[in-house]
Amino acid sequence: QGGGGGEKRPMTFTLKAPKSSRMDLVIQAGLTYTMAYDGKQAWSIQPWTGSMDPQPMNADDAKDAGRMIKFMWNDLMMTSNDGVQLQYIGKDEIEGSEVYKIKSTSADGSEIIYYLDVDSYLIIKWTSRSMNSGVLSESDTFLGEYQVLNGRTLPFVFEQKMNGETMNVYEEYVVQKGYTVAETRKAAPKEVPAWYAERYPGATYESYQEALHDYLNGI
């Protein structure tokens, strides 16, 4: 679930290591924005344009789509993907907690500074810097509500800020793993998520959308 400006909207992330990712964001019942990346190409479906056909994304937007995978597999876990270089750059303090700082630099020049709690080694924040259309873009992501799931300690809340202002808050409620994921570039635009189909056998895409609509109205 994510939202900015006080709004809450259900969303589903489908992630497949090392690089494939897909996000489906429900704008309203029957209106779902999709963004996906297969490691080489990115596409999106923008239903408000009147078309449900996948459209290729430009280079800068494709970079953003490719970064979705870092929600589950960050650069500290998977440094061999893109020629990522890691550098320890000292200690700092965040809200009274001492942290280690590790800078990750990708082959395209984009950087992420990870802030790790010195006691638990959990990431409590990361700062992303990248060039988009010749303009430097910087944002902070704060991680919290860690829980142990399938043997991994994962954050269940991501708060994204730019210039100190909260832009989005992502709250995870359901995490499913172990499903076979088709190449995201070729995935069918209207498909029921695997976890929903398992929970509700015979579910159609329309019934899935109706359930999301009911959920959204109940928030």
Image (cartoon, rainbow, N blue to C red):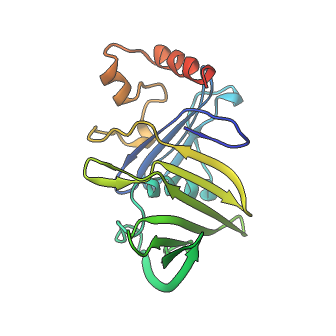
Residue occupying the point 42% across, 53% down: 146
Q: Which quadrant would the N terminus be assigned to in this image? A: top right
Residue occupying the point 64% across, 48% down: 168
Number of numbered callouts drawn: 0
Q: Measured from the top left, where is residue 197 in percent x and y?
A: 34, 22
Residue 63, quarter of picture? bottom right
Q: Measured from the top left, where is residue 113 in percent x and y?
A: 53, 73
Residue 137, quarter of picture? bottom right
Q: Measured from the top left, where is residue 204 in percent x and y?
A: 42, 15
Q: Is residue 185 above or below residue 58?
A: above
Looking at this rendering, what residue extends furthest in the front direction? Answer: 96
Residue occupying the point 72% across, 62% down: 164
Task: Report if residue 105 is visible in the image.
Answer: yes
Task: Report if residue 103 is visible in the image.
Answer: no
Residue situated in front as seen by the camera: 82 or 144 = 144
Q: Measured from the top left, where is residue 20 in percent x and y?
A: 40, 50
Residue occupying the point 52% across, 43% down: 171
Q: Is 24 situated left or right of 130 in this image?
A: left
Q: Is 151 situated left or right of 188 in this image?
A: left
Residue situated in front as seen by the camera: 61 or 122 = 122
Residue 5, quarter of picture? top right
Q: Which quadrant would the C terminus be assigned to in this image? A: top right
Residue situated in front as seen by the camera: 49 or 200 = 200
